[in-house]
Image (spheres, rainbow, N blue to C red):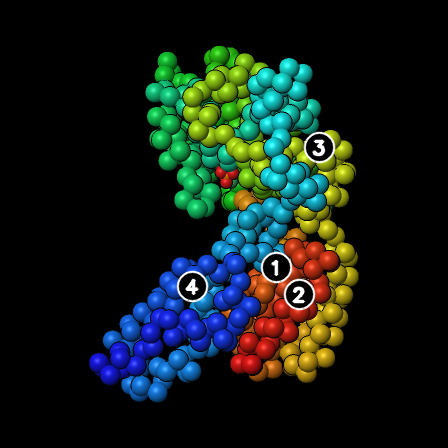
């Protein structure tokens, strides 16, 4: 074993070999010497570990010459930025693992402008003195939702925390048992409530809650009634919940506020795309919710944010809570959100120009056409390099994701690849190593991609990464 350890080349020797093998990589200003050195040390440490567990038996396998390709690949990976773009072929429109929403072009431009320049974030442009960072967003949100006042924080979890901390601390909040949900990523409504120092009064049963249940639970300690949109699941069958208007009357009768965590918080009606039953923010305000909170980066299609709209006096109290400062969002978020919301002033414009609602609204015919075009481009690309793969079109389903419209299957056409050599599973793994990587799904021994979540402008990239993936699969 000692001879094997001694066979490992010195760090400086490795660095010289890397420089000779990949001058463009190792000589680049993006490859600081200290980082390169650490990567080389890390690589040889992994080989020492492999020797210890008996994976190497011959010195010849540990020469720099033999190990150089692996070393180069380790260094390449280590120098790559951690955040990279990927192609989403999963057909899940709001995919939390892939950063949820893709911003509209208008929003990207606004972010870029605010990012690379000083901006009037907190400037009063009449006096040159201090202004409010939200002053730009609030009137837009009120205009679009019908709320009297608005406030934006870091995300919807923060919005809920702020509401509970401001209005319900050390008191009780009434919530239906059927709404005590876990959203994913370990966000659980009861946990947030506990953190805010609020006591949860659960009423009703999992599948049925009646007005009388709420009424019976109201005591001196009650601070509010909370309704949580159950987002990622649906109770079907024997089910009852109290309508928003009835809850509003009950809350009024007892002088209690009615809050609503809408989750996705759609500003558009998607029933023309066959998506029903998700209340819009506007409807919730109109039916008497005192404050509504929702995410900026789910169905809305904007940046990560927690948006709160509702009664003027109540929102003012949120803004005055010291916690608001800790939960505030930055200039990039506000710039993106403003640009996105401006598109919503005309709902049809938002549906056309904001990628999330646009992808949700694509029709089965649009997608069949897109799938044919995508398949054609892939076939063409792989033919020119003489790689073999069966390409078929199949009917399939897409999902909205992000906990919105969970019960709906959106019809689509999948482009399915079955490699002639190697398995579909291996092809899926190969697509993780392409530049950019492409995420898809396995169905019936084929790797399938859904054109719903791939913009037409990226079809050429999909064709080119398919060639890369088939090369990787073939071990070339
Ligand atoms: C997604 C969701 C949240 C959390 O929103 P974030 O913006 O991810 O913090 C809270 N409540 C409901 C009902 C949700 O669907």
Q: Nearer the viewer, residue 214 or 444?
A: 444
Q: Position of residue 420 (x, y in %)?
A: 60, 82
Q: Position of residue 415 (x, y in %)?
A: 67, 67
Residue matched to label 2: 462
Vertical position of residue 3 compared to residue 136: above or below: below
Q: Secondary structure at mark 4?
A: helix
Q: Position of residue 291 (x, y in %)?
A: 55, 23
Which label sits on residue 342? 3
Q: Within the image, what quadrant is residue 455 found in? A: bottom right
Sooner in the amino-acid sequence: mark 4 or mark 2: 4
Sooner in the amino-acid sequence: mark 1 or mark 3: 1
Sooner in the amino-acid sequence: mark 3 or mark 2: 3
Q: Nearer the viewer, residue 202 or 133?
A: 133
Mark nearer the viewer, 4 or 3: 4
Residue in view at x 43 percent, y 73 percent: 16
Q: Secondary structure at mark 1?
A: strand
Badge 3 local density, few (<14 within 10 Å), some, or many (20+)? some
Residue matched to label 1: 87
Residue in view at x 71 percent, y 41 percent: 106
Q: Position of residue 195 (x, y in %)?
A: 36, 31
Q: CA distance from mark 4 to mark 2?
A: 32 Å
Residue in view at x 59 percent, y 78 percent: 471
* Quarter of the picture holding the N terminus: bottom left
Residue matched to label 4: 36
Sooner in the amino-acid sequence: mark 4 or mark 3: 4
| Circles 1 and 3 in contact, beta carbons < 8 Å | no
Q: CA distance from mark 1 to mark 3?
A: 27 Å
| Circles 4 and 1 in contact, beta carbons < 8 Å | no
């Amino acid at each position: 074993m000692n001879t094997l350890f001694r066979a490992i080349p010195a760090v400086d020797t490795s660095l010289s070999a890397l420089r000779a093998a990949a001058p463009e990589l190792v000589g680049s200003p993006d490859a600081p010497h200290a980082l390169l050195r650490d990567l080389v040390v890390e690589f040889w440490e992994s080989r020492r570990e492999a020797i210890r567990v008996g994976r190497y038996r011959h010195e010849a396998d540990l020469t720099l010459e033999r190990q150089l390709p692996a070393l180069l690949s380790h260094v390449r990976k280590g120098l790559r930025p951690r955040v990279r773009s990927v192609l989403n072929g999963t057909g899940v429109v709001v995919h939390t693992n892939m950063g949820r929403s893709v911003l509209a072009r208008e929003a990207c431009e606004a972010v870029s402008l605010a990012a690379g320049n000083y901006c009037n974030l907190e400037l009063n442009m009449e006096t040159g003195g201090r202004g409010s960072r939200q002053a730009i967003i609030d009137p837009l949100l009120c205009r679009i939702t019908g709320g009297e006042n608005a406030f934006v924080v870091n995300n919807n979890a923060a919005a809920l925390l702020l509401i509970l901390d401001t209005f319900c601390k050390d008191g009780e909040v009434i919530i239906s048992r059927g709404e005590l949900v876990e959203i994913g990523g370990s966000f659980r409504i009861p946990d947030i409530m506990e953190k805010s120092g609020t006591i949860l009064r659960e009423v009703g049963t999992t599948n049925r809650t009646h007005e009388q249940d709420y009424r019976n639970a109201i005591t001196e300690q009650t601070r509010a009634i909370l309704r949580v949109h159950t987002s990622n699941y649906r109770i079907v069958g024997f089910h009852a919940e109290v309508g928003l208007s009835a809850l509003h009357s009950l809350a009024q009768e007892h002088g209690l506020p009615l809050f609503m965590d809408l989750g996705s918080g759609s500003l558009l009606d998607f029933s023309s795309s066959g998506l029903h039953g998700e209340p819009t923010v506007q409807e919730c305000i109109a039916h008497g919710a005192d404050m509504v909170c929702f995410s900026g980066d789910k169905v809305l299609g904007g940046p990560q944010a927690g948006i709160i709209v509702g009664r003027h006096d109540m929102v003012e109290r949120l803004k005055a809570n010291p916690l608001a400062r800790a939960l505030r969002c930055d200039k990039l978020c506000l710039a993106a959100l403003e640009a996105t919301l401006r598109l919503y002033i005309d709902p049809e414009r938002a549906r056309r120009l904001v990628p999330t609602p646009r992808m949700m609204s694509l029709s089965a015919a649009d997608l069949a056409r897109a799938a044919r075009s995508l398949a054609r481009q892939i076939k063409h690309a792989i033919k020119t390099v003489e790689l073999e793969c069966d390409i078929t079109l199949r009917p399939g389903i897409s999902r909205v994701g992000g906990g919105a419209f969970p019960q709906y299957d959106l019809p689509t056409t999948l482009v399915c690849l079955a490699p002639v050599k190697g398995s579909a599973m291996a092809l899926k793994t190969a697509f993780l190593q392409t530049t950019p990587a492409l995420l898809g799904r396995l169905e019936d021994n084929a790797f399938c991609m859904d054109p719903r979540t791939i913009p037409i402008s990226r079809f050429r990239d999909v064709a080119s990464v398919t060639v890369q993936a088939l090369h990787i699969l073939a071990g070339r």
